[in-house]
């Protein structure tokens, strides 16, 4: 797949309310390129709620159902059920933030996964409750500043894709807005499968992570090249690295994590011990992957 | 065809006859037989619906909202804590103007845990924008649920409907129920139309995005107007039902009210015992009557004040409690009667909380106490059969 | 379509003329542009318009001036200029 093969049409119109450099907005634009407009979106409370712009206008050329914070996976299950009864072959896609997925939305998501509902669930992970003003979520990484973790988050990031994989759904993947073709391929693959498909989209947020708006893609790229964010997919239980992550199994091939951390204001007050902790966490994750890939 | 059915099974048959398309199911005592019977209908192919076994009541209502937004006729059922747990989504369903129908088997709220009959649960969500009915018999339960879909889906209404029934005294009690033929029901209740909007890629719209104060009030006014309009549609639909199926309920059920001097006003199956008490008192020359409110929301204030303006004394029996404020129906009745030139004497009774029985003798006692209080001019409210010594160690 | 609830219709500029948000404006140096479309794919707004011949044009009415296009352009054909 090539950038040039992508659809010229924009399914999410400009003049929306997102911050300059917003990854959630970019993610949706890429979703439009992947899907076209023959799909229905479910959006729980979060940045995307506001990005749409106010009533009576919207930036979405796809039908979009806004819903309460905890309810996106269940609401999507309901839409999917209705389409099944009415024999309508229309994909149902959730576009939810990390708060609405890893925290308040996790129960409904787990339920939908256990029932293997025919829904594609995309979590755009900007690693905090960004829409309400940068408060920490369980998806905020260790050490990050947020308005509720002023000295840096003590807990480690909740591994939501791993939780979803444990539900044995047909497809789990991670993606990044810095690697659009990888994301688009994963969305398209999901739409060809039946059941719950989960894509976790890394979304570096200039406003919440404290970096200049032009670096959104650069930060996303550094996350992957330092190994802090790993691109992979698990299709019917088979794990596979994708994109640049494929060549990062060797420790030496990964850039030092400091390169990723130093561009972000939210990591400015890390102690050496905290940086060591972060580095160790990354190395442990890659060791786990080594074991999976080798077996 | 007459079948002997419990209240819960009457609900299930009503859902079957209404051709519901998506059912979300979460169990809670004393509603479990509803979801079990419907599961049987679906799994034996009697009901062609998608049955979603959700993981919580909040998700049960969310599934209904999603399915209804996509154009399906949806159904769920709950009680007590389930209703309160899903309550965020209950409000959502109404403000989103979705024609969902949900029976509520009314059960006490804890702590402490209690599975028995009380109406506080359905009363607490009175202001959540749902049309609310409360049934006296299993026949009425079945009939009302089918009527509810007609009302909800009416273009003038587009609001969700709750049908309340008493825990155990209706839900688990068998009564003869005339189950109509599905063809007759289908004529009365056609498939749901897509008006005025559904989720459809060919006509893309966004539902419910951020709305500024400059626009919101008008939307709320339309919401409010639809609820006001609903009262007329309720009466219309009931009238049509009567023509087809020979049974009519109205907004209010009046028992010997025409020439009554003292009336017990209440809701639900317990009204049956009140009616028995009224009959017994009539034989003693007391002009007793019973007024059962069937349509709880929007509250039939106008109809109520017309009936009660000719009555000397009213005893409002609340099987619910707003702590510190008293009975919720009492409050509504008093505000309905405010503008009347000739207001009746009103006495409130809190009875039957936590599932405690209200017997025929209790209702006779209520009539007599009310008459006595009327003569003394001693209004207010009291708790029936309270025995505080029973809980002191 | 009868509007009984909060139903919104798709439109450009749902949040207004977001071009007025800009402090820095992306300016294209045509001779440096190799039509790789990397700026086009990374623009979060969809305000980089892709012409038939794959050359690009910026919709200044809505461009917020985030600078991602300039940052990502491999030939540095886009410069952020003060508005």
Image (cartoon, grey):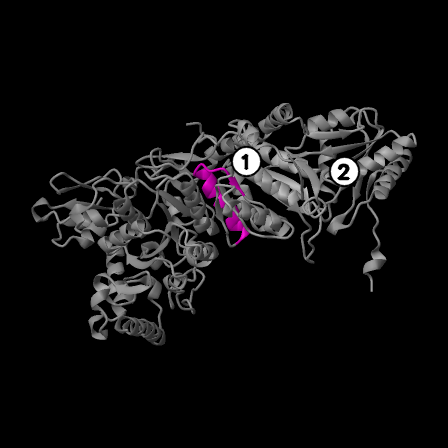
Dot 2 falls on which chain? B
Tell which of B76 and A174 is nearer to you: B76
Disc 1 from disc 2: Cα separation? 28 Å
Q: Is residue B64 magenta?
A: yes
Dot 1 falls on which chain? B
- Residue ID at (49%, 35%): B216
Residue A80, percent from left and from top? 41, 45
Residue A143, percent from left and from top? 38, 68
Mark with earlier residue (1, 2) = 1
- Residue ID at (59%, 29%): B230
Q: What is the span of residues highlighted in magenta in the rendered image?
A: B56-75
> Of the numbered discs in the image, which one, if any, rests on residue B18?
1
Residue B234, percent from left and from top? 61, 28
Label 1 vs label 2, nearer the camera: 1
Q: Is residue B250 above or below residue C47?
A: above
Q: Secondary structure at mark 2?
A: helix
Residue B173 located left or right of residue B98: right
Main SS of residues in magenta: helix
Determine the image quadrant of residue B207: top left
Q: Which residue is mark 2?
A: B271
Few, some or many C-alpha atoms within 10 Å of disc 2 (few <14, some 14-19, many ≥20)? many
């Amino acid at each position: 797949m090539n950038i040039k093969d992508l659809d010229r049409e924009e399914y999410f119109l400009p003049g929306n309310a997102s911050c300059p450099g917003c990854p959630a907005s970019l993610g949706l634009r890429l979703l439009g390129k992947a899907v076209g407009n023959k799909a229905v979106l479910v959006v729980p409370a979060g940045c995307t709620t506001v990005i749409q712009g106010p009533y009576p206008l919207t930036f979405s050329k796809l039908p979009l159902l806004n819903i309460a914070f905890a309810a996106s996976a269940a609401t999507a299950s309901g839409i999917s059920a209705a389409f099944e009864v009415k024999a309508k072959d229309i994909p149902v896609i959730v576009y939810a933030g990390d708060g609405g997925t890893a925290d308040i939305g996790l129960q409904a998501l787990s339920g939908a996964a256990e029932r293997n509902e025919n829904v594609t669930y995309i979590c755009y992970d900007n690693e905090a409750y960004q829409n309400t003003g940068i408060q920490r979520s369980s998806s905020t990484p260790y050490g990050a500043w947020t308005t509720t973790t002023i000295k840096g988050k003590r807990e480690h990031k909740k591994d939501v894709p791993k939780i979803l994989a444990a539900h044995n759904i047909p497809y789990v993947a991670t993606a990044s807005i810095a690697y659009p073709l990888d994301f688009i391929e994963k969305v398209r693959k999901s739409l060809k499968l039946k059941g719950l498909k989960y894509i976790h989209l890394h979304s570096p947020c200039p406003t919440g992570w404290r970096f200049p708006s032009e670096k959104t893609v650069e930060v996303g790229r550094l996350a992957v090249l330092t190994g802090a964010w790993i691109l992979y997919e698990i299709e019917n239980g088979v794990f596979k690295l994708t994109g640049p992550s494929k060549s990062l199994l060797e420790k030496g091939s990964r850039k030092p994590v400091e390169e990723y951390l130093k561009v972000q204001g939210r990591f400015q007050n890390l102690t050496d011990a905290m940086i060591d902790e972060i580095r160790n966490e990354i190395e442990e994750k890659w060791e786990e992957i080594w074991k999976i890939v080798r077996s | 065809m007459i079948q002997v059915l419990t209240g819960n099974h009457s609900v299930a048959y009503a859902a079957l006859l209404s051709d519901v398309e998506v059912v979300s199911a979460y169990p809670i005592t004393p509603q479990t037989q509803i979801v079990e019977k419907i599961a049987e209908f679906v799994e034996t192919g009697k009901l062609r619906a998608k049955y979603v076994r959700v993981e919580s009541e909040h998700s049960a209502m969310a599934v209904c909202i999603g399915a209804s937004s996509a154009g399906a006729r949806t159904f769920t059922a709950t009680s007590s804590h389930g209703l309160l747990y899903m309550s965020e989504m209950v409000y959502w369903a109404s403000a989103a103007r979705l024609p969902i129908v949900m029976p509520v088997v009314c059960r006490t709220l804890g702590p402490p845990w209690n599975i028995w009959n009380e109406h506080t649960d359905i009363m607490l969500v009175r202001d959540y924008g749902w049309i609310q009915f409360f049934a006296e018999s299993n026949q009425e339960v079945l009939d009302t649920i089918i009527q509810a879909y007609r009302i909800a889906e009416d273009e003038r209404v587009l609001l969700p409907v709750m049908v309340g029934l008493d825990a155990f005294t209706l839900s688990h009690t068998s009564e003869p129920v005339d189950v109509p033929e599905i063809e007759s029901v289908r004529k009365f209740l056609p498939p749901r139309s897509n008006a005025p909007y559904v989720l459809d890629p060919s006509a893309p719209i966004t539902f419910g995005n951020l709305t500024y104060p400059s626009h919101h009030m008008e939307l709320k006014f339309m919401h409010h107007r639809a609820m006001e309009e609903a009262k007329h549609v309720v009466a219309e639909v009931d009238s049509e039902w009567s023509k087809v199926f020979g049974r009519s309920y109205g907004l209010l059920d009046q028992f010997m009210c025409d020439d009554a001097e003292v009336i017990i006003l209440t809701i639900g199956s317990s009204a049956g015992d009140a009616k028995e008490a009224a009959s017994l008192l009539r034989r003693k020359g007391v002009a007793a009557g019973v007024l059962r409110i069937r349509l709880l929301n929007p509250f039939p204030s106008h109809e109520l004040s017309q009936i009660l303006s000719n009555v000397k004394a009213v005893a409002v029996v609340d099987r619910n409690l707003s702590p510190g404020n008293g009975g919720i129906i009492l409050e509504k009745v008093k505000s309905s009667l405010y503008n009347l030139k000739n207001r009746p004497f009103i006495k409130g009774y809190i009875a039957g909380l936590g599932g405690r029985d209200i017997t025929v003798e209790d209702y006779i006692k209520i009539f007599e106490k009310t008459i006595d209080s009327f003569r003394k001019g001693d209004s207010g409210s009291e708790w029936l059969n309270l025995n505080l010594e029973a809980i002191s160690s | 379509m009868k509007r009984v609830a909060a139903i919104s219709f798709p439109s450009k500029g749902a949040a207004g003329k977001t071009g007025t948000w800009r402090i820095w404006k992306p300016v294209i140096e045509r001779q440096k542009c190799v039509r790789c479309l990397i700026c086009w794919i990374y623009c979060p707004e969809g305000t980089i318009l892709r012409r038939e011949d794959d050359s690009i044009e910026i919709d200044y009415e809505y461009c917020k001036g985030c600078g991602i296009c300039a940052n990502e352009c491999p030939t540095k054909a886009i410069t952020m200029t003060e508005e």
